[in-house]
Amino acid sequence: MRLNDKVAIVTGGARGIGEATAKLFAEQGAAVSVWDVNGDAAESVAAAINEAGGRAIGCAVDVSKKDQVDAGLARTVSELGGVHCVVNNAGITRDKSAKKMTEEAWDLVMNVNLKGTFLVCQAAINQMLEQGTGGRISNTASVAVDGNFGQANYSASKAGVVGLTRTLALECAKAGITVNAVAPGATDTPMFDAVPDDIKAAICKSIPLRRMADSREIAQVHAFLCSDEASYVTGQLIYADGGATLGV
C-alpha cells in the first residue's frame, strides 16, 4: 500500500477534508494520529478507523497552542512509534469585509491557519530530524490565496501558508523532508452546509468541471504528496479546484 508502515498526523481530522484524509491514509496503510480541537470527534474518527481494521488514535489539539501541539506529538510518537507524514488541514473562517472585520476575527484566523501550521510543522520537522528518516509535510492552502471578497484574514493566512511551505521546503530538503501545499477549491464539506443552494449552484456554474469537489478527492492529493511517489516534489502549491482558477 502507498503509505504502508508510515505514521501520519492529520490536523483538523474530525470532519470534512481532514476526516476523509485520515480515513484514506489508514486505508493506504498508515497509522494515523487524528488531531482536532474537538477531542471527542477526533476519537470518534479514530475509533471508526480502528473498527475498519486500521490503526489510529484521536488527540484533542488546538494547533494554535504550542503546549498542545507538543503534547499531541509526544503522544503520537509514544503510541504509534514516530512521525513520517503530516497533513496540516486545521483551519477556520471568520468572514467579513475588511472595513467591518474585528481585530479578534483577524487574530483568530491567523492563529489557527498560519501560526498553527507553523507550530505543527516545527514540531514534526524536529521529530523527523531526530528520527533521521526524512518525511513528508502537506499543508493546506486555498484558492483564496489569489484574493477573495470578505476574506482578508483567511486569504492572508493561506498566502502565508504558501510562503511558509516554500521556505520550509528549502530548509528541509537536505534532510530528505519534502514540504508542499494543496489549494482546494470549493469542496462539499460541513463548512459549506450554511451556504444557500442558489449560491452553491452559482459556484458550481463558475467551475469548469461544474461541481464542487468531494473531500476524498482532496485527500487523494495529500496522499500522493505524502507518498514515496512524490519523493522529488517539494515546495509546490497544487491547485485542486476543478479548473476554477483558470479564468475561463
Image: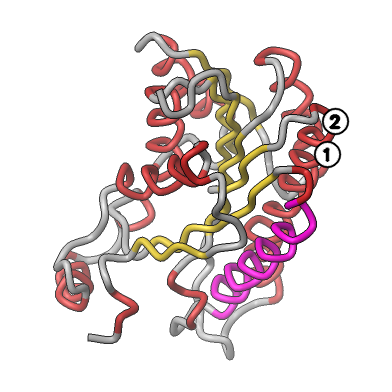
Which residues make up the magenta segment? 152-173
Res 102 quadrant in image: bottom right
Question: Type of residue at label 1?
Answer: Asn
Q: Name the residue under label 1.
A: 126
The residue depicted at 42 percent of the width and 18 percent of the height is 49
The residue depicted at 71 percent of the width and 36 percent of the height is 134
Q: How far apart in space, not on screen, are marks 2 and 1 (Cα)?
A: 6 Å
Relative to residue 60, is residue 124 depicted above or below? below
Q: Mark 2 points at which residue?
A: 130
Magenta segment, prevailing SS (helix, strand or loop): helix
What element does badge 1 sit on? helix
The residue depicted at 40 percent of the width and 45 percent of the height is 17
What element does badge 2 sit on? helix
Question: Type of residue at label 2?
Answer: Glu
Residue 186 % position (x, y):
32, 63
Relative to residue 18, is residue 48 depicted above or below? above
Nearer to me, 233 or 119:
233
Residue 245 % position (x, y):
34, 78
| Label 2–label 1 contact, CB within 8 A | yes
Q: Estimate how packed mark 1 is, as few (under 14), some (14 to 19) or many (20 or more) residues with alpha carbons within 10 Å.
A: few
Number of numbered discs present?
2
Please state if 214 lies on the left or on the right of 175 as rendered: left
**Quarter occupied by the C terminus:** bottom left
Does the segment drawn in magenta span residue 41? no
